[in-house]
Image: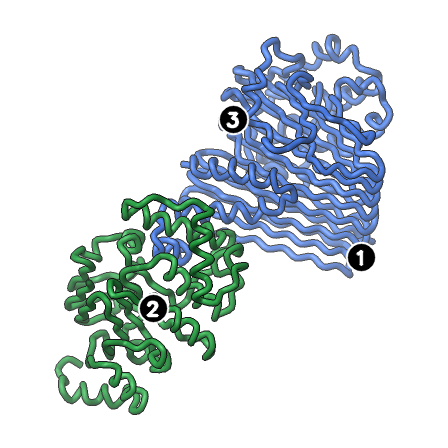
Amino acid sequence: MLEIKNLHARVEEREILKGLNLSVKAGEVHAIMGPNGSGKSTLAAVLSGKPGYEVTQGSITYKGKDLLELAPEERAREGVFLAFQYPVEIPGVNSTYFLKAAYNEIRKHKGQEELDAMEFLTLVKEKMKILELDTSLLNRPVNEGFSGGEKKRNEIFQMAVLEPGLAILDETDSGLDIDALRIVAEGVNKLKRKENAQIVITHYQRLLDYIVPDFVHVLYEGRIIKSGNKDLALQLEKDGYDRLIEENEKRQPALK
Amino acid sequence: MITANPPKVKEANLPLACFDAFETNEAGRDPAWVQSLRKAGIAHFAELGFPTTEHEEWRFTNVAPIAKLPFKPQLNPSSTAPSAREIDPFTFDHLKGNCLVFIDGHFSKSLSTLAVKDGLVIRSLAGELASGGILEQHLARHAKYDENAFAALNTAFFRDGAFIVIPKGVTIAEPIHLLFVQTSKENGAVCHPRNLIVAERDSHAIVIEDYVHLSDAAYLTNAVTEIYVSEGAVLEHCRIQAESQQAYHIATVQAVQERNSRWISHSISHGAAIARANVQTLFTGEGGDAILNGLYIASGKQVVDHHTVVDHAKAHCTSHEFYHGILDGQSKGIFNGKIFVRKHAQKTDAKQTSRNLLLSDTATIDTKPQLEIFADDVKCTHGATVGQLNDDAIFYLRARGIGLELARQMLVHAFASEILDRITVERVRKELDDHIYDRLERRS
């Protein structure tokens, strides 16, 4: 589904990703972990097409298409979804109006008929239950005045409505208390299908108690230095990143 | 602030010559009190002339194109009136209230819808001049035409407009719609609408003053509206300027507020090549409250100018001012917000916010707060911002599948909605919102 090969990317002349490889198949959940500054959020930004991030080498293909050729909205219509680490408040833009516009753009792209307001509302109310969100949020401007937890739940709610092929969750657990974390994680689990995939980016193992990954990758200095199954996350929780980094440096000193 | 004797331009001679003929013909039939107002008006205009950019109040808005127009006042109704079908797109579909239609500044009975009740007075001003009374008490007593050349010109040449009296204690739920339609195909056609709205004690009403066009000529609308809000009364005034892009529009709105009165003003301006609105209120009693909302949208080479004045002449009054500007192309916006707090106006609470969105590198805005405070126990705040669309918000929308152009439109529209949402009548707000959305999509 997703193939990232030898990805190098920079922001403002500073190289952040330095040869990242990742292969994700349909039905899989991948966790990407790593210390601060390792390039986790840059990877999310590059995948979603955020302006300001320049890919200098390598390739990303998604369902056989060259993702780097596509504008952010085209990627979204193809099924790439980014759950933002910091969801943006947009005063004056009504949440329902926004989400209906997004939903119908994706439908149009797939050659499906657009939903009218009534049909959309029925769909949305059903999806809200998954995230235990209050329907009053729908009448408010996008993210405006939402609490930190509401913002994160709103991201997953949008994911539930838009049903992406590939969801990238960028530090969705940060700033959540344990109850909100459980609701968000359960929401994500309910959305898991054998035809879609998820990349969960996180600093802590905590989220992975709820979202069980098939693969865990450790990102450090712009490359994946170790991959494994869910046990790798537990090992990291116990030993911290330092030990792994040390081992890595012993193994590949030249790359440092 | 005061420039002594700003230089006059010779174009001012045109209106003066026109006035001589007007005075002996059409205006000769007016009652004496009106004739003397007109004489005073033209005298002030003769003295002031058309303003130039050397005049402090007109520093950023050059009205030379207006002064150069062949001055052809529309003194009499045109022989060919538009049909009801042509007017229909301009009326609010779902408003059941009164609608007064003025064609080229003259009242059209056949196109208007009048359902007067509760002692409400909604009439053509021209037909009421002979009766004097309240009209004579208020007309030209509030808008200062001794220092404003355009108000002086209007006072000399006005023919018609709306005369509205909301009787004591009466609440009129349905908005009163005043629709001014310009049809002249002649460059230099000038119309001088003159409106007087008197809200008597404890009354409550909403008036929409709306300027539209069926012609694309370089005409001039020079309107004056005086509003008297008596003790305890509430008057919402929604002014919409949607003139032809070739036309010129100058407006003077002067409110006077008695004790515990409330005036809610909306000034929405998106038409005309050059548009200037002076929106002013004066507190003559304590406990008054004024809300001044404004939205201006310009593109191409449009110039849109708002000068507001809130005169806190009495203590314990509040005023809140919110103006938003959306400027594209090579357009130019001007916002000047003056707040006077007079010596004894203690406990004044005045707030002013001017926010502007520049959508191109060549659009400009001059925004200036002007606070003159002579009392010591007051709360006055002001803030102005000028910015572009928020890149993070655009990316957020795009990351959900919304295209760049639609994302931009949504954000611009949202910025406009923050002002439109303040209009209390939902049906007016919704229709206006649609009009503005169309306008924003057409902008280029």
Q: Is residue B414 left or right of residue B198?
A: left
Q: Which amino acid does label 3 sit on?
A: Ser
Give the residue pinned by disc 2: A169
Query: Farthest residue toward the right?
Result: B133
Q: Name the residue under label 3.
A: B244
Q: In this view, does B114 lie to the left or right of B182?
A: right
Residue B154 visible to the viewer: no
**Image disc number at residue B346:** 1
Q: Distance between the residues labelled 1 and 2?
A: 56 Å
Chain depicted in blue: B
Residue B149 percent across, percent down from the top left: 67, 29
Front position among marks 3 and 1: 3
Picture residue at 58% right of the left edge, 18% below the top:
B84
Figure quadrant of the N terminus of chain A? bottom left
In the rendered image, residue B236, in percent from the top left (x then y), is placed at: 70, 40
Number of other residues with Cα within 10 Å of mark 3, as a class: few under 14, some 14 to 19, many 20 or more = many
SS state under label 2: strand
Closer to the observer: label 2 or label 3?
2
| Distance from the alpha carbon under mark 3 to that under mark 1 | 44 Å
Between residue B235 and residue B10, name the one nearer to us.
B235
Mark before the other along the chain sequence, 3 or 1? 3
Q: Please tell me whether residue B172 is drawn above or below residue B178 in the rendered image.
A: below
Image quadrant where residue A156 sits: bottom left
Which element carries disc 1, helix, strand or loop? Answer: loop
**Residue under disc 3 on the same chain as residue under disc 1:** yes
Residue type pointed to by label 2 = Leu
